Every structure is written in structure tokens, then in C-alpha cells.
Amino acid sequence: MKIVRVLLPLLFLLPGCSTSSTTAVAESGVKQQYLSQYSKVQDDKERMRHLDVGYFAGGCFWGVQDEFNRAPGVVSTIVGYCGGITRAPTYESVCRHGTKHAETVRVVYDPGKTTFKALTSYFLDIHDPTTVNRQGPDIGDQYRSAIFFEGEKQKEEALQAIESKNASLPKNSSVVTALDKFVVFYTAEDYHQNYISRTGDASCHVR
């Protein structure tokens, strides 16, 4: 019995048995679940209004937002950050490339006037979807081309639009836009919202 009493405490000192690391992982999972649910609540509010939501990243979000504001069927847009690994990123932290977020536009649209496939086709036309982590002079993973889909229907419609776009490109070129499952969206700072329409500065966007 004495041997057993000595060995039991030692088990908690073995690699992988740290209660603090296990707790940290659990807490991280809870936070991520909460943030994910928060994003879904915002989307559900729009769907209660018989609207739908899409998330698109294609270089500087100023230009992408400005283009989507003119797209048929679009009700509203917000710029922010999606697809990263850290919580509550700021513009400065995203620009340092440590968060892995992409500058993203949340697009609320009327499914009675447009479709996710149509919006994806529009998106592929308003930026260069053939360059990796780059749009013109803007270079970095935050400028990558990506679509964050919710559900298999959005994924399938995006794939159809990408296939159509590929058919129109030269043989030595193809769409590199990533299709990633949506998890959470963080709204960007106020001064980024509708930047081009407020300032008239469209220098960031390459079409």
C-alpha cells in the first residue's frame, strides 16, 4: 500500500498529465465555442429578416467592401477579420502576420434577389483570385483570397463559381482562392468601415 501511495502522485508529474495545461485547453475550447456561437447569433438575426450572409476575403478589405456595396442584392457589409488562430485581433496584430487572419468582408444579402454563387462569381471578378497572399502591392497572408462558407450549399455554390472562373482563365492560370469553413468573424475598427466611400481613397484595391 505504501508503494501505491507514492506512485499515484507521480503520475500527475508525467508529460501530458499537467492539470494546468488540460485546464488551459478546456478554457480555450470554451472561449472559441462562445465566440463561434456569437457569430452565428449575428447571422441568425439576419436570417430572421429573410436575409443571408457570406464572408469574402480578397486583399485590402476597403476595396472589397466598396465593390460589394454596389453588388445587386447586397443589403449591407462590414469589414473585419476571419480565419485566424487568435482571439479578438486588432489591425496592428493582423498586419504583423501572427494571427493568421484574413481581411474579410461580411456580406448580408437578399436571397430573393441574388445567390451565393452569383456573389462568389462577382467576388472572383473584383480581385485577382490567381495570386497567393497578394493583391497588387499588398503582400501578406492577411491579403489572401478566401471564401469562408457556412454549410455544404454555400461550399457547393462557391465551387461551381470557381469552376466557371477557371474555364475563363488562360491555361497557365487558375483560381487559388481558399474555401474554408466559417468559424468566427471579428468586426474591424470603426475607421476601416466604408473607408473608400468616406475618404475617396481607392488606391489599395487592384481589380
Image (tube, rainbow, N blue to C red):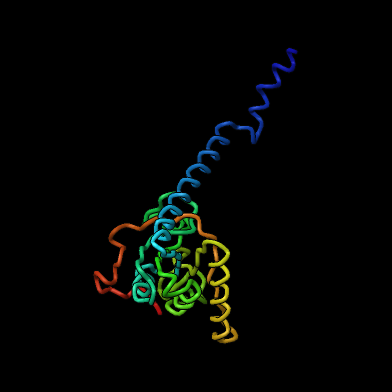
Residue at 65% in and 22% down: 9
In the depicted structure, whether residue 8 falls above or below residue 111:
above
In the depicted structure, whether residue 40 falls above or below residue 172:
above
Screen quadrant of the C terminus: bottom left
Q: How many marks?
A: 0
Residue at 41% in and 50% down: 88
In the depicted structure, whether residue 26 falls above or below residue 48:
above
Q: Nearer the viewer, residue 144 or 54?
A: 54
**Quarter occupied by residue 122:** bottom left
Farthest residue in the left direction?
Answer: 199
In the depicted structure, whether residue 91 falls above or below residue 121:
above
**Quarter occupied by residue 77:** bottom left
Residue at 34% in and 72% down: 69
Left/right of residue 189 with respect to residue 94 in the rendered view: left
**Quarter occupied by residue 60:** bottom left
Whole-percent x, y for residue 4 in the image: 73, 17
Residue at 74% in and 16% down: 3
Whole-percent x, y for residue 190 in the image: 29, 58
Screen quadrant of the N terminus: top right
Whole-percent x, y for residue 183 in the image: 50, 55
Q: Nearer the viewer, residue 74 or 63?
A: 74
